[in-house]
Image (tube, grey):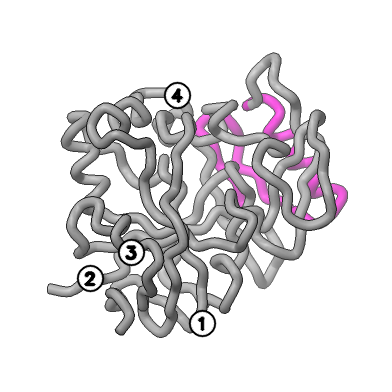
Amino acid sequence: MGWRLAHIFRHPVKAHGREALDRGTLVPGRCLPFDRHWAVAHEAATLMPGWNPCMNFTRGAKTPTLQAIRSAYDEGAGVLTLTHPDRPELRVAPDTAQGQADFLNWVAPLMAGGRAQPVRLVSAGRGMTDTDFESVSILNLATLRALSDRVGVDLGMDRWRGNLWLDGPEAWEEFDLVGQELHIGAARLRVVERIGRCRATMVDCATGRIDHDTLDALETGYGHTDFGVYAQVIAGGEIVTGDAAGRAT
């Protein structure tokens, strides 16, 4: 059997929730539409116009409770829905002043004491990906199973905050794709680099609490703390879960 696209996820607000999709449209040079479209700037941020590095934003590596947020964005209505086990459901229009205020009030009780507190939602006309180029993250279900077996528990997909999950490659085979091109459905992507991981991956996304030292498991088991790869879209098109995927020829 060949490779296939098993899952699609986007994260409308960077580090504040994830949303499963059945399909999406990739555009050359862009990330998945509305992935990391907004980010939450904290009070110590020094922002420049356009893209800014992740140190300027509140995120799960510093505040584990944020990892338990789930989100959904209705593009037609412009409404973002957020849920968390410790908070009531919130529906906001994130580009409005009232929506911003409601969001900040909702997220404030989840923030860790002693951390720089969130002050506003920002957008830049592009995805606030962890890379300075608009990237699509590609992960491998076989790699997840291999690491889960090493830890002794199913680590699940959510903690890795990936966009596209492939079924079919051997464990860690995605690293061999760096510098190569990949087709998924009607789209074509160039794999650029491996994804170095942070403490956010140590968090159980059902509870927002640290449960497993994924970084130590990666380091002791494989000699690195990388999981997944970043890719750049070079030919656009619609992608649908179940689509065939593989090395481009």
Q: Nearer the viewer, mark 4 or mark 1?
A: 1
Whichever of callouts 2 and 3 sits on the residue coming sooner in the sequence is 2
User: Which residue is labeled 3 in the image?
Assistant: 177
Range of residues picked out in magenta: 81-110
Q: Amino acid at mark 2?
A: Trp
Q: Nearer the viewer, residue 24 or 88?
A: 24
User: Which residue is labeled 2 in the image?
Assistant: 3
The numbered dot on residue 209 is 4
Question: Helix, strand or loop at disc 1?
Answer: loop
Question: Helix, strand or loop at disc 2?
Answer: strand
Q: Quadrant of residue 16?
A: top right
Q: Residue 14 at x, y = what percent?
A: 61, 47
81 in relation to 168, above or below: above
Tell me if label 4 and label 1 are in contact, CB under 8 Å.
no
The numbered dot on residue 55 is none
Spatial CA distance of label 1 from label 3 is 19 Å
Q: Quadrant of the C terminus?
A: bottom left
Q: Please say whether residue 66 is visible from this viewpoint.
A: yes
Q: State yes or no: residue 95 in magenta.
A: yes
Q: Residue 4 at x, y = what percent?
A: 26, 71
